[in-house]
C-alpha cells in the first residue's frame, strides 16, 4: 500500500513507470452553494488516471465520489482546478462541445442504468451513435447488435428495458457506453443496485474491457470488487486520503 501524500505523482510513476497518464485532475475543489451555505464537496484533489488502468474510487456515502465522477464526465464543473483528458481541458468546454466530446470519448455507466424506457435495448445502444454520427447510418444497428451480443443480450435486443432484469439493463447500459468505442469508461456505483452474483458479471465485463485496452474508473462501495482493481483511490470528506496499488497488477 502506498499512502497518499504530496509526492503522489512519484508514487504512481513508481508503481508502474510504463503507464501513461490519460486523465489529470489537478487541485480540484468543488463548492456547492445551498441555502446560503457553502459546502466543500471536493477539497483540493489531485489525481492522475493512467491509460489501461482499472481504478476504483471508494469512500463512505457523502464523501464526494459522485461529485468526483461528475468532474471527470463534465456533468458538473469544478469550482477551482483543472481536468484534462487526453490533452483536452474539459473544465473549459461549454455544454454543447462538451456533450459531443463526451459522446465520443467517454462511456458513462450509472447506478440506475438510465436507459430510455420507451426505446428498446437496441435503440438505446444506437442512440450515442446517432447523436455523434460516429458510424455510417447503415452500420449502427449491426454494431449495436454486436455490442448487445458481446454482453450476452443478443436475444433481448428488441425488448424494452422494463421487460428485462436490472442486471440485464445494466449490461445493456454498458453496451450503450461502448457504442462509440470510447477509450475511457466512467462508472458511478454500477453494481450498487445489483445482487452480488450479477455484480460479479458486470465487474467481469469491465475487467474484460480493461484487458482489451480500455481505461475504467469505477466508483464503488463494494470493497470486494474494489480490491480486485489495479488501484483503489480512497475519498473521505472530499479529500483524497490514500491510494492502494494491487500487488498482482504491477508486474
Ligand atoms: P457520494 O457519491 O460519495 O455519496 P456525493 O459526491 O454525491 O457523495 O456528495 C458529496 C457531498 O456533496 C454530500 O454531502 C452531498 O450532500 C453534497 N452534494 C452533492 N451534490 C450536491 C448538490 N448538487 N448540491 C449541494 N450539495 C451536494
Ligand atoms: Mg454517489
Image (tube, rainbow, N blue to C red):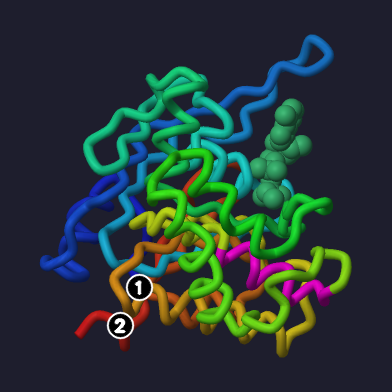
Magenta span contains residue 75: no
Task: Report the residue at 17% width, 57% height from top.
Answer: 20
Q: CA distance from mark 2 to mark 1?
A: 8 Å
133 sits to left or right of 221: left
Between 27 and 19, the one lying in front of the other is: 19
Helix, strand or loop at mark 1: strand
Between 96 and 23, the one lying in front of the other is: 96
Placement of 139 over or under 77, stated as above or below: below
11 sits to left or right of 208: left
Q: Residue furthest right?
A: 162
Between 197 and 67, the one lying in front of the other is: 197
Give the label on residue 245, or none: 1
Q: Position of residue 59 (x, y in %)?
A: 62, 58
Q: Quadrant of the N terminus?
A: bottom left
Task: Report the residue at 40% width, 21% height from top.
Answer: 93
Q: Residue furthest top?
A: 36
72 sits to left or right of 19: right
Q: Position of residue 143 (x, y in %)?
A: 46, 66
Which region of the structure is painted magenta?
Answer: 164-175
Q: Position of residue 123 (x, y in %)?
A: 66, 56
Helix, strand or loop at mark 2: loop
Task: Report the residue at 26% width, 50% height from top.
Answer: 22
Q: Rate crowding at label 1 as few (under 14), some (14 to 19) or many (20 or more) other CA atoms within 10 Å.
A: many
Nearer the viewer's eye, disc 2 or disc 1?
2
Residue identified by numbered label 2: 249
89 sits to left or right of 68: left
Prevailing SS of the magenta stretch: helix
Between 167 and 227, the one lying in front of the other is: 167
Do the residues under discs 2 and 1 have CB atoms within 8 angstroms?
yes
Q: Residue furthest front?
A: 138
Q: Position of residue 247 (x, y in %)?
A: 32, 84
Amino acid at each position: 500500500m502506498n499512502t497518499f501524500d504530496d509526492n503522489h505523482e512519484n508514487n504512481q510513476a513508481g508503481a508502474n513507470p510504463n503507464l501513461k497518464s490519460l486523465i489529470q485532475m489537478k487541485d480540484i475543489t468543488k463548492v456547492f452553494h445551498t441555502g446560503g451555505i457553502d459546502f466543500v464537496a471536493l477539497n483540493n484533489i489531485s489525481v492522475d488516471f493512467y491509460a489501461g488502468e482499472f481504478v476504483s474510487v471508494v469512500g463512505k456515502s457523502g464523501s464526494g465520489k459522485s461529485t468526483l465522477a461528475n468532474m471527470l464526465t463534465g456533468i458538473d464543473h469544478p469550482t477551482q482546478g483543472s481536468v484534462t483528458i487526453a490533452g483536452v481541458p474539459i473544465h473549459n468546454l461549454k455544454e454543447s462541445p462538451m456533450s459531443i466530446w463526451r459522446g465520443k470519448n467517454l462511456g458513462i455507466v450509472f447506478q440506475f442504468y438510465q436507459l430510455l424506457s420507451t426505446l428498446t435495448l437496441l435503440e438505446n445502444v444506437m442512440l450515442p451513435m446517432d447523436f455523434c454520427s460516429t458510424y455510417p447510418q447503415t452500420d449502427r444497428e449491426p454494431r449495436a447488435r454486436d455490442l448487445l451480443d458481446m454482453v450476452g443480450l443478443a436475444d433481448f435486443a428488441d425488448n424494452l428495458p422494463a421487460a428485462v432484469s436490472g442486471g440485464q439493463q445494466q449490461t445493456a447500459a454498458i453496451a450503450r457506453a461502448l457504442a462509440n468505442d470510447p477509450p475511457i469508461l466512467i462508472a458511478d456505483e454500477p453494481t450498487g443496485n445489483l445482487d452480488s452474483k450479477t455484480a460479479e458479471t458486470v465487474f467481469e465485463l469491465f475487467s474484460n474491457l480493461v484487458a482489451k485496452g480500455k481505461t475504467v474508473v469505477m466508483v464503488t462501495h463494494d470493497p470486494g470488487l474494489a480490491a480486485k482493481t489495479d488501484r483503489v483511490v480512497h475519498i473521505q470528506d472530499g479529500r483524497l486520503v490514500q491510494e492502494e496499488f494491487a500487488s498482482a497488477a504491477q508486474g
